[in-house]
Image: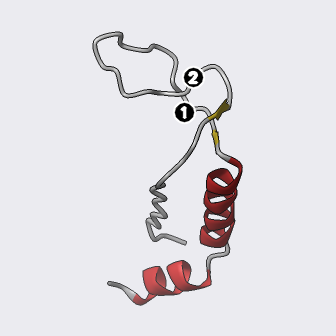
Amino acid sequence: MPHAQQKYKKNSPFWTVEFVATVKSIYEGVVHPTINLEHHDPDCDLGEVAEGARQMPIRAALKNSLGFGGT
């Protein structure tokens, strides 16, 4: 991995904001809407949250922090 990418990921404050938001969602039991979901396919029932936040028990969460290098 190039040095610039390592530096970006290590020093980026954004992962901490994402982490805190994820933990807060689990603690409060709130699932936030899926971003940019405009057309729901009725044949693909994944439980998307489209209209607004939804109260529900949360047992696990996946948080992807992807840094794509650059300057």
Residue 31: give x, y in percent of width and height: 61, 39
Q: Can you say which quadrant of the picture contains the N terminus?
A: bottom left
Dot 2 amino acid type: Ala
Q: Residue at x 28, y 12 (%)?
A: 43
First in residue order: circle 1 vs circle 2 = 1
Task: Look at the picture and state if 59 lies above or below 20.
Answer: above
Q: Residue at x 49, y 52 (%)?
A: 59
Q: Which residue is mark 1?
A: 34
Total numbered labels placed on residues in the image: 2
Q: Residue at x 36, y 85 (%)?
A: 2
Q: Which residue is mark 2?
A: 50
Check the image and name the residue furthest to the left. Answer: 43
Task: Look at the picture and state if 70 lies above or below 61.
Answer: below
Q: Quadrant of residue 52?
A: top right
Q: Is residue 59 left or right of residue 1?
A: right
Q: Is residue 30 left or right of residue 36?
A: right
- Element at badge 2? loop
Residue 23: give x, y in percent of width and height: 63, 62
Mark 1 near mark 2, Cβ–Cβ under 8 Å? yes
The crowd level at tag 1 (other Cα within 10 Å; few <14, some 14-19, many 20+) is: few
Dot 1 amino acid type: Thr
Q: Can you say which quadrant of the picture contains the C terminus?
A: bottom right
Residue 12's disc number? none
